[in-house]
Image (cartoon, helix red, strand yellow):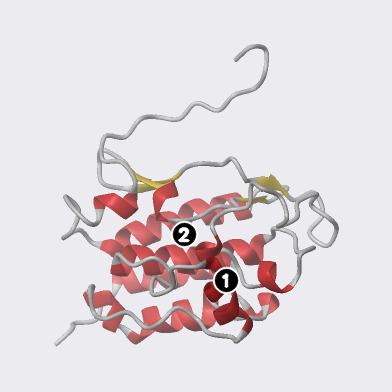
Amino acid sequence: MGGRPSMVMQWYDKGCAAEYLKGPGLGVNRMSLIYDVTQGLNYLHTLSPPIVHGDLKGNNVLITNEGHAVLSDFGLSKVIEDLVGPTGYTPSSPEVGPLRWQAPEFVEDEKCKLGLETDVWSFGCTAYELLTNYTPYYYRTKDALIMRDMREGIKPPGPDGMSPFTQDERVITLLYDACWSFSPSSRLQMSTIVLQVGEICANPKAIA
């Protein structure tokens, strides 16, 4: 537009996942939607060079007319030319995504850069949101308190059974160990996470 490159995306009447799952999509298979998200994020991460989404959350996951989840809002996305070098992005930027979905290293280090590991933390927060209809750290109303929790190593609280999948220990392990490690290097890569989520979807455990 106006001689500048622009991104055009399809319009989806079902809107974003965060709102869809609170209304018309209340009874849908939430893990199936999360699997769609893992596939989209893994695709970005395995491009050459990789792309970091940078603002993953329930409001940036759209539901297609066929009921699948797709990623949207790439305003903060960055191409990583060198994974060990600077990306040119710092959390002091006014464009940084909401704190609730951001990795704790942004709180600890003002020079922290977006990376594949920060996307993995945000994916965990988004999966938590889609499973429970709660935002991460939902019990906190002020960013300062969320930052304090992160500095103290406090992860979002365990879900209260709003979805049967939240009673599956494989899902809890995926969130709390694979995605929400406070050591970025200890988080699993999306290529591994997409396989784990696919296995959970293919072999759901019966919940008593």
Q: In this view, does 139 lie above or below 113?
A: below
Q: Where residue 37 sits in the image (x, y, percent)?
A: 43, 55
Q: Nearer the viewer, residue 167 or 42?
A: 167
Q: Nearer the viewer, residue 62 or 208?
A: 62
For label 2, the SS is helix
Quarter of the rendering occupied by the C terminus: bottom left
For label 1, the SS is helix
Q: Which of 186 and 136 is in front in this view?
A: 136
- Residue at image location 80% in from the left, 49% down from the top: 88
Name of the residue lying farthest toward the top = 2
Which amino acid type is shown beneath numbered disc 2? Thr
Horizontal side of residue 176 vs 133, given as left or right: right
Q: In this view, does 175 lie above or below 6?
A: below
Occupied quadrant, residue 153: bottom right
Where does label 1 land, which residue? 144
- Residue 189 visible to the viewer: yes
Say few, some or many: other residues with alpha carbon within 10 Å of mark 2 (under 14 / 14 to 19 / 20 or more): many
Q: Which of 7 and 31 is in front in this view?
A: 7
Q: Is residue 151 above or below residue 17?
A: below
Disc 2 vs disc 1: which is toward the camera? 1
Q: Where residue 170 sits in the image (x, y, percent)?
A: 38, 82
What's the CA distance linking mark 2 and mark 1? 30 Å
What label does residue 56 carry, if any? Answer: none
Horizontal side of residue 173 vs 12, given as left or right: right
Which amino acid type is shown beneath numbered disc 1? Ala
Where does label 2 land, which residue? 38
- Residue at image location 63% in from the left, 81% down from the top: 151
Horizontal side of residue 137 vs 102, given as left or right: left
Say few, some or many: other residues with alpha carbon within 10 Å of mark 1 (under 14 / 14 to 19 / 20 or more): few
